């Protein structure tokens, strides 16, 4: 076996870079902050209503999907700006399509949330 199979300093460094990326997204992207706060509210409600394990898993997965797409959207926006800062019509289309992907995931997360919380929120 190679002696460098697991290098703790590389692992720590990669976590440092990832945390720096999260910090950048939190600091510079309003939608990311809103989505994080919405996720916290949803998780608090999940624990308050004592959702089933599978309901909690579904909510956590939806939150993660939305946040990952928002991070990818931020990445591609910065990359496209770097490579072609609004010089071509396609740049705007690429950014719009990425924003649409985040919107679709967010709407899907809202639908999943409504389906999961509906029994707890109905007025009878």
Image: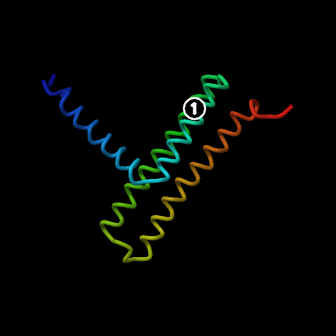
- In this view, the residue farthest toward the left is 3
Q: Is residue 79 above or below residue 119?
A: below
The structure's colour scheme is rainbow
Q: Quadrant of residue 87?
A: bottom left
Label total for image: 1
- In this view, the residue farthest toward the right is 124
Q: Residue at x 30, y 66 (%)?
A: 82
Asked if residue 75 lies left or right of residue 35, the reply is left
Q: Residue at x 47, y 53 (%)?
A: 30
Q: What residue sits right under mark 1 in the picture?
A: 43
Q: Callout 1 environment at 10 Å: few (<14), some (14 to 19), or many (20+)?
A: some
- Element type at marker 1? helix
Q: Residue at x 46, y 64 (%)?
A: 95
Q: Quadrant of the C terminus?
A: top right
Residue 40, given in percent of the width and then of the height, sits at: 54, 36
Asked if residue 110 lies left or right of residue 72, the reply is right
Q: Quadrant of residue 10?
A: top left
Task: State the residue in front, 73 or 49.
Answer: 49
Q: Is residue 110 above or below residue 57?
A: below
Residue 20, given in percent of the width and then of the height, sits at: 30, 44
Task: State the residue in front, 41 or 98.
Answer: 41
Residue 122, given in percent of the width and then of the height, sits at: 80, 34
Q: Quadrant of the N terminus?
A: top left
């Amino acid at each position: 076996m190679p002696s460098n199979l697991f290098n703790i300093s590389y692992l720590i460094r990669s976590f440092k870079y990832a945390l720096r990326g999260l910090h950048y997204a939190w600091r510079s992207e309003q939608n990311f902050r809103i989505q994080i706060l919405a996720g916290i509210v949803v998780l608090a409600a999940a624990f308050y209503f004592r959702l089933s394990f599978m309901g909690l898993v579904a909510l956590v997965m939806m939150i993660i999907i939305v946040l990952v797409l928002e991070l990818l959207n931020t990445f591609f926006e910065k990359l496209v700006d770097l490579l072609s800062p609004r010089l071509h019509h396609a740049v705007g289309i690429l950014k719009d399509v990425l924003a649409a992907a985040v919107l679709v995931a967010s709407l899907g997360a809202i639908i999943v949330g409504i389906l999961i919380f509906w029994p707890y929120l109905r007025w009878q």
